[in-house]
Image (cartoon, grey):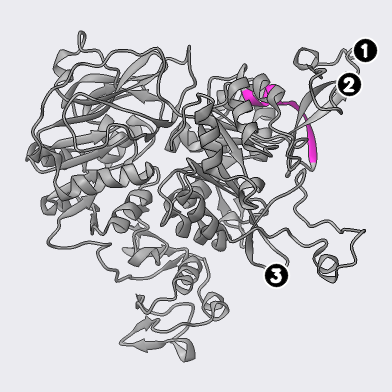
Amino acid sequence: MEAKGSKGSDGLLGDVFEDKETDATVLYGLEEAGRDFLDRATAKNVLLDGKIGGSRGGTDGETIGGHLSFTKAISRRSFCSRVKSTPLKIPITRPASSSSSTMGVYILDYGAGNVQSLANSLTNLGHSFTWISHPDDFANATILIFPGVGAFGTAIQYLQSRALLDPLRQYINSGRPYFGICIGMQILFESSTESSEQGLGLIPCPIERFDSTDKSVPHIGWNSADFLQDDPVDSSSYHYYVHSYCAKYNPEKYPDATQWVHSTTQYGQELFVSSVRKGNVFATQFHPEKSGKAGLALLDAWLRKPMSALTSAPRTPPKLKSKHSLTKRIVACMDVRANDQGDLVVTKGDQYDVREKADLTSSSAVITQTAGAVRNLGKPVALAARYYALGADELCLLNITSFRHSPLQDQPMLAVVRAAAECVFVPLTIGGGIKDSVDPDGTKRSALEVAGAYFRAGADKVSIGSEAVYAVEHLRASGKGDGTSAIETIAHAYGRQAVVVSVDPRRVYVDPTTYDGPYKDELVMGQPSGTENERGKAWWYQCTVSGGREARQLSVVELARGVETLGAGEILLNSIDRDGTGLGFDLDLINLVKKQVHIPVVASSGAGSKEHFVQVFENTAAEAALAAGIFHREEVQIVQVKEALQTSGINVRL
């Protein structure tokens, strides 16, 4: 069964596959399509040939020439009761994406990563486009954009298997404008140490892995670029990077490749090529579609006047600086769950308890009625749009209830992701239910399939929680990974940088004078300057699952080492003890984990003031810091946090 993509009419049709054996089209996610259609409340028609769920229209729609046409608002219950998420093999008539016959802008989707973000960006900018779905489509393209993340070899193999590699090479050689993003830039090079596959070979230089000796790998976050050629792009802008492999800038070793270099970026003490430009070709290692206003401006400028029309004026070659310009990231997190009325809301827990507490000292009827209710701090899409506008570097949506037995049927959450991705142009991480599961009808769903659904909806990264603990327990018992865990399968398909592991440790207090257990080398000693309940005590950090409700015989150090081995690209480090307390981040926990791994760490739990963000970056090597409640309640604004960091000499994106 061959993927045709989920590029239906404004994203309404769900996931479409072509079944070559039966010469039919399989449409997945019809219930999702119905929800999405109704949420948009538009007057657009969705035409599906044939019968759906045995319905021929009735009061909720009308049948016109064998087509079921939705021309007015119908009840969600009525639509979704007749259109289930069970795959249906039906012929589909769908428009040519967002295309315009006069523009000739085409997007090449090689099947991995979040290409929907680029589509959303182009739509936001008012540009129409068509998806490349057949080798013959290249002949119709006058402008081609190739975005993507993931493994170099996977991209080449996919292009070869779909007979798209040679047409792509011919398109570039024709002189028509080409814009490559991330993998779309790397395949222009001759090879990659990540794979035995050969690239297009336009640029005589290999792609190599970053050296992790002095820094975390992957390179994740907002960094600057030094331009070697004149450019209309604001050189002071930061752009978003997420990659483990790069083209290292080495003019002595690869002099012919140097003439392609448009800009370089420094990470640690390595210079790499962050964009290339020559003739009709322009490509970036960073993601303009995830780089906020600066990235959108770059996309818009290139589409209105492709850079092949610009003249080049060489500048002074770059040199290593004492320090790179990678910024510290501020992440706004939204814990999403259904309230008692069934609506998805953003909530926040106090040590993971998200229900309102009864105030026994108050006689207020309102307080009495809300006691025990799920704490409601707003709607997820509205808050996501707000935090993007206020300058958040990344957003995180964690579905803390999810459909534990059937995550792919959690259509409201998928709709939230899709809607958020349409108005947010910074990285979006989604968590909750990323695991192997079985639908009520017995259909098995893999974690990879669940992650793929989120990526197609607009997510850039997925967060894995309890499943990571179980995978590391298996790793420690067997001595090696078996390639089947959620971390391994998703990292293999989409790249390590797409996998975040969310860790929920809790302190276990012991007597340091007598404790001789397996975690004595991980003990943290309470300092005299610490909080009152920590002074004179010692503890180790125990991992938990199921939202902190179940403790496991696994320490946070063992978990951190294990998930890095399995292929995680980033750790979201929570603290049950600090969650909702406003006492500040657990610096001891963060330092303990950072010393054990070479992947980025996001500090989480405990932020109560802007000063706490300064403390975590001054006293730990964490790459990012996350907060939720203080942003939701507007006790602290994101811009206030960034101004405090800048005043303290910490590099941030303002």
User: What separation in Å lies between label 1 and label 3 (alpha carbons)?
Assistant: 51 Å
Q: Is residue 156 magenta?
A: no
User: What separation in Å lies between label 2 and label 1 (alpha carbons)?
Assistant: 8 Å
Q: Residues within 10 Å of mark 2 (few under 14, many from 20)?
A: some
Residue 159's place in the image compared with 588, above or below, is below
Q: Residue at x 53, y 78 (%)?
A: 82
The residue wearing badge 1 is 514
Q: Residue furthest top?
A: 252
The residue range painted magenta reads: 550-560
Q: Is residue 580 left or right of residue 44?
A: right
The residue wearing badge 3 is 341
Amino acid type of the residue that numbered disc 1 sits on in the rendered structure: Thr
Q: Is residue 552 magenta?
A: yes
Which of the two residues, 517 or 276, is positioned nearer the viewer here? 276
In the rendered structure, are the residues bearing label 2 and label 1 in contact, judged by CB atoms less than 8 Å apart? yes
Locate residue 495: give its quadrant. top left
Q: Residue at x 44, y 71 (%)?
A: 40
Q: Residue at x 69, y 51 (%)?
A: 348
The residue wearing badge 2 is 510
Q: Is residue 212 left or right of residue 512?
A: left
Amino acid type of the residue that numbered disc 2 sits on in the rendered structure: Val
